[in-house]
Image (cartoon, rainbow, N blue to C red):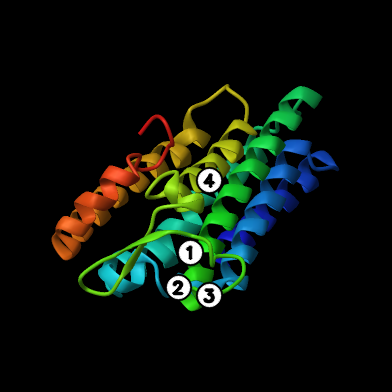
């Protein structure tokens, strides 16, 4: 919520300076608000993420959520408050398409995984194939999760890139977020894969043979 409140403050700052808000500011503010509201609406699914199941509550989550996240993730609106950007129609369409496509991948993949975890017999997921591990866990090998082991990370990063691109190309400062987020997601994927390898053993090797890509289908 701190992230959202800071964004709103930056949007009002721009409005007080210019007498209006630029299309870039409107896009970033609405898109990031959408992202925050989505996290709150689907809060139950957050309980199964690596942050909760593996990392646990400590300095990283406390500092990250209370300080780092609101200050760093609001960097685009902070930049736009000082350096307004009026996007062309083509530029606007490009970032909107990237945002919508990223959200679609992010939400559909996460919802599919959560639906399967809650009820494998649900009509929306009953045809999904999986590998049964010795520990009893099921590893999905079709649907969204047959494309890549962390397909949701791709959608997440696409959204972050759209917010940065909305700030134009005059400075690298607003691009800090998508660069940092790329490193975070790759590092997170490597940690998760190492944990799963240790936990599932041969089942994980079989899974990796069937789902070859880690985040980006056909690329990585």
In the orientation shown, which residue stands out farthest toward the right? Answer: 19
| Mark 2 closeness class: few <14, some 14–19, many ≥20 residues within 10 Å | some
**Separation (CA) of disc 4 from disc 3:** 26 Å
Question: Which one is earlier in the sequence, the residue at label 2 or at label 4?
Answer: 2
Question: Which one is earlier in the sequence, the residue at label 1 or at label 4?
Answer: 1
Contact between labelled residues 2 and 1, with CB atoms less than 8 Å apart: yes
Taking the image as shown, residue 175 lies to the left or right of residue 183, namely: right
Question: Which one is earlier in the sequence, the residue at label 3 or at label 1?
Answer: 1
Contact between labelled residues 4 and 1, with CB atoms less than 8 Å apart: no
**Separation (CA) of disc 3 from disc 1:** 13 Å
Camera-side mark, 4 or 3:
3
Q: Specify the label residue 155 is tagged with.
A: 4
Task: Determine which residue is flagged by label 1.
Answer: 113
Q: Specify the label residue 117 is tagged with.
A: 2
Front-most of residues 86 and 103:
103
Residue 31 vs 125, above or below: the answer is above
Taking the image as shown, residue 134 lies to the left or right of residue 4, namely: left
* Label 4 residue SS: helix
Residue 53 vs 38, above or below: the answer is below
Residue 43 vs 172, above or below: the answer is below
Q: Specify the label residue 121 is tagged with.
A: 3
Number of callouts: 4
Where's residue 197, x and y in %? 18, 56
The quarter holding residue 214 reads top left
Front-most of residues 81 and 159:
159
């Amino acid at each position: 919520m701190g992230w959202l409140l800071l964004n709103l403050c930056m949007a009002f700052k721009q409005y007080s300076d210019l007498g209006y808000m630029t299309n870039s500011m409107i896009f970033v503010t609405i898109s990031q608000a959408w992202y925050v509201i989505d996290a709150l609406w689907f809060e139950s699914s957050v309980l199964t993420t690596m942050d909760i199941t593996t990392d646990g509550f400590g300095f990283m989550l406390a500092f990250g959520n209370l300080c780092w996240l609101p200050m760093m993730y609001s960097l685009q609106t902070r930049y736009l408050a000082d350096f307004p950007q009026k996007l062309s129609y083509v530029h606007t369409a490009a970032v909107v398409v990237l945002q919508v496509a990223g959200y679609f991948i992010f939400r559909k993949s996460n919802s599919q995984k959560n639906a399967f975890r809650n009820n494998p017999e649900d009509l929306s997921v009953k045809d999904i194939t999986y590998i049964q591990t010795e520990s009893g866990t099921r590893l999905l090998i079709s649907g969204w999760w047959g494309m890549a082991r962390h397909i949701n990370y791709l959608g997440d990063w696409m959204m972050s890139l759209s917010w940065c691109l909305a700030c134009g190309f005059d400075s690298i400062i607003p691009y800090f977020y998508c660069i940092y987020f790329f490193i975070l997601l790759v590092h997170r994927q490597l940690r998760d894969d190492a944990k799963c390898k240790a936990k599932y053993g041969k089942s994980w090797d079989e899974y990796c043979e069937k789902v070859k890509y880690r985040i980006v289908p056909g690329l990585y």
